[in-house]
Amino acid sequence: MIKLIRDLSINRKLLLVLLFSSVSSLLFAGLLLIVLEISEFQKNTQDDLSILAQMVGNRSTAALMFEDRDLVNENLAVFNNLPDVQAACLYDAQGAVFAHIQKNNDQQWACPVSDKAENTRFEDTHLHVVQPIIVDTTDVGMVYIQADLTPAYWRKVQFTGLIFLVLAGVSILTFFLSIPLLRLISSPIKKLVDKVKKISETQNYSLRAVKVNNDELGILVDAFNGLISTVEQQNQALTRAKDRYLALYDDNPTMVFNLQVDGRILSVNHTGARHLGLSVDEVQGCSIFNFVHRDDLVVIHDLIQSCLMRPLSVYKQELRQVCNKGNTIWVRATARLVENEDWQNSLLLVGEDITEARLLSEKMAYQASHDALTGLANRSEFDSYIKRTVVLAYADNSEHVLCYLDLDQFKVVNDTCGHLAGDELLRQLGELLRRHTRKQDFVARLGGDEFGILMNNCSLNEAFLACENLRDLVKDFRFAWEGRSFTLGVSAGISVINSSSGNAVDLLKEADAACYAAKDNGRNRVHVFSPDDEELAMRQGEMQWVEKIQQGLEQNRFCLYGQPIVAIAHHDNDEGMHFETLVRYREDDGRIIPPGAFLPAAERYNLAPSLDRWVISHLFEWIATKPGFIDQLSLCSVNLSGLSMSDETMLAFISEQFSKWAIPAHKICFEVTETAAIANLSYATKFIKQLKERGCLFSLDDFGSGLSSFAYLKNLPVDYLKIDGLFVKDILEDKVDLAMVKSINEVGHVMGKKTIAEFVENEQIFNLLNILGVDYAQGYGIGKPVPLDELTLITPFLQHFQHEC
C-alpha cells in the first residue's frame, strides 16, 4: 500500500492527503459527536429520572407511612407520560413492592426483588434508576425505575447521522474547492519534473524551468535553474576537457596502447592505428606481439614482466614494430601498470616513432667511427679497437701487430694539384689498403695522410712482410690527375701487441715513433719499434715534452734568463746593458730544465711559434714594468724560430706587443739561426725587412755552421753576426777554427755588420778576439745565464772584467 502511494504523482498524493484528511476528520468528528451525544443523553436522562424518582419518593413518604396505595399509584402515574420508562416500582422499608406501574406485561419489566446495595446503572440500552427514600436518616423505602432508551438512542443516531451527512457534504464541497489550490502547488512541481525529464532525455542543459510564483516553489525553481546553470557550465567544461583529451589521445603524435597483461590490445589511438596501417577497430582485440619484430619479442616480454613486477615504476625500451604492409619502424616504448575503475590491471604503453632519430643516430655513430673521405674507420674507432685487442692479448696470450703508415710526398700532390686531388688520392689509397689486407685486419685513417692497420693474430715477421708488401704496392701505385702522374712512398712503423704490451696510448706512441724513425732514416721504409732503440727513445722523449710544453705555456712554467754580451773594444765600454734572452722550464719540484731538452720537440711538433710568443710577451712585460731598466738597456736579444718567421700572424703579434708595452723597437734585436733563415730565405728576408722598418735589429745566430753561409749572407739584412761557438772555443789550439773566426769577422765587417763571438770561456780567448777585431763576446767566461731580475747585479762585475782585459 505504502509502496503504491510512493509511486503516485505529487498531485495525486496531495489529493490523497486532502481526501484522507477530510475523511479522517469527518469520521473522527462523527464518532466523537455520537459518543458525546450518547454520553450527554445518558447523563441527562439519568439525572432527569433520578430527580423525578426523588420527587416521587418524597411525595410518597406519607403514603408509605399510612400505606396509602392510591396516593402512591397516583404519584407513580407520572411515569406513564414518559415513553422511555417501562416500569416504576415503590418499595417499603422492608423491601416489599408497595406499588408499581408497568406499561406492558413483558416479564422483563417486572419489579425485581429489592436489593439495598443496588445502584443506578445502565445495561445496554436499559437504564435502571434506584432512588432510596430517606426520612431523617431512616430508610423508609425505595423508588425503582426501568427505562428502555433504544428509541431515544435511535433518535440520537438519526440526528447524528444527519449532522454527519451535513459535514460530509461540506467536506466534499471543501475538497472540490481545494483542488484548484492544490494545483497551485502541483502544477509548478509537475512543470519542474517535466523539465527535469526533458533535460535528462535530451541532455540539453540550456533548458530552464519556468518560475510561476515567488513562494518556496519559486525559490526551488530558482535553485534548480542555478544548479542546471552550474551543471551546464561544468558539462561544457567537461565536454571541452573531453574534446581536448580525445584530441590529445587521438591526435597525439605518439602511439598510445592500452593492453591487457597478456598483450591483448584493449584500445589504441588513431596515431597508433595509423602507424600500423590499420583502423582502430581492426587493431583492438589483437595481440601486441603480432606487431613486434620477432627479434624483439623477448624485449617486449621483458618489458611487460618488469611492469608487472614493479607496478609503480616506468620502463622504457627501444624495439622494432612491424606494420601491416610489412615495413618496420623503430619505436621507443614507455610502459607502466595502471588500474581501471574496476580495479583491474592493464598496461599503458606509449610508443614514439624514432625511426628517423635511430637512422640518424646510426648514421652519426657511423660518421663518429668512420672517416667521411675514405669510408675507413677513424682515429677514435681505431683507438677503441686497439684497446679491445690489448685486452684480448692479455686474456689469451695472443700476439697482434699495430702498423702506423705515413705517406711520403703527399704534400707535393696536395700543393701541386689542390685539395680535391689530395682527397681523391687518399680515397684511392684507402681502398688500396683495404683490398690488400686480410679480412681479420682492421684498417683506419688516423688523420691527414696517416693510416693505421691492426693485424690480428699476426706474428712480427708476418706483419713486417705484409708492411713491405704494402710499401711496394704504394710505391708502384700511380696517381693520375689532370694529365699528371705522381708516385708516392709510405713510411711505416710497427709495434707488437702481446701480454706484456702497454696500453693503447703507449702502443700508438711506439708505432708513431717507429714511423717517424722510418722517415728520418730516408722515408719509404718499415721500422720496427724496439725498447732498446736509442733513436726511438729520443723521439719518445720529444713526444713526452709536447704535453709538458703545452702545460708550461698554459700554466706559465717557463721562466726567462739573460746572458750578458759585452763589447770587446775599450772605446765601447760605456755601452749600456746588452744581453741575450734565454728560456728555461721549471719542473714541479723547482728544478730548472735547459732549452736543449725541450726546444727540439717544440721545433718538430710546431710548438716553437707558441713558445716564441710566450717569451716575447713576458719579456716585454718584464722590461716595461721594471723601473728605470729601459734607460740602462742598450740592446736585448730575443731568439725566433724558423717556424715563427713563416707564421703570417707573428708580425702582427710582435707589433701589438710593442704598442702594448711601449718598448723602443731599436732596443730589441731578434736572433734567427742561419739554418732557419736559409731554409726559409724568402720568408726570412720579408720578415726581417718589415721589423727593421719598425726600428728593430737582427742578429744571425750560429753563423758558419751552414754549408753556404757566405753565399746567402749578402741577401739577409741583419745587423749582427754571431760566430758559431764551435769555432770560437778552440781558437787557441786549432788554427783552422782561428782562420774561420778571422774570415767570418772580416767578411762581416766588410758587409757593415758587427760580430759577436759565442762560447767565450776564458780571458785568453777574449784577448785573442780583441786582437782579431771581433766586436762583442758572449760566454761562460763573460757571464753565465741568470734570471732577468739578477742581470743588474752582475753589471759592475762585467765592467771590471772589461777593464782588466
Image: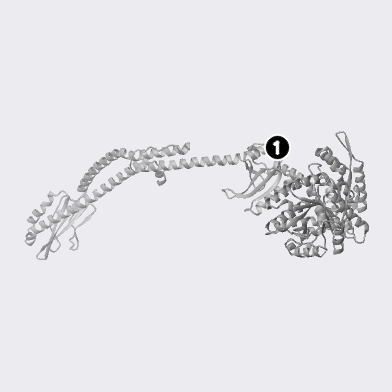
The three-letter code of the residue at mark 1 reads Asn
Name the foreground residue: 675 vs 106. Answer: 675
Give residue 771's quadrant in the image: bottom right
Name the foreground residue: 666 vs 267. Answer: 666
Percent from the top left, x then y, of residue 283? Answer: 65, 39
Q: Residue at x 44, y 43 (%)?
A: 230
Percent from the top left, x then y, of residue 178? Answer: 30, 40
Name the foreground residue: 368 vs 274. Answer: 368
> What colouring does the structure picture have?
one colour
Q: How many marks?
A: 1
Mark 1 surroundings: few (<14), some (14-19) or many (≥20) residues within 10 A: some
Percent from the top left, x then y, of residue 606? Answer: 79, 50
Left or right position of 575 against 54 = right
Name the foreground residue: 672 vs 400. Answer: 672
Left or right position of 295 against 8 = right
Residue 378 visible to the viewer: yes
- Identify residue for label 1: 324
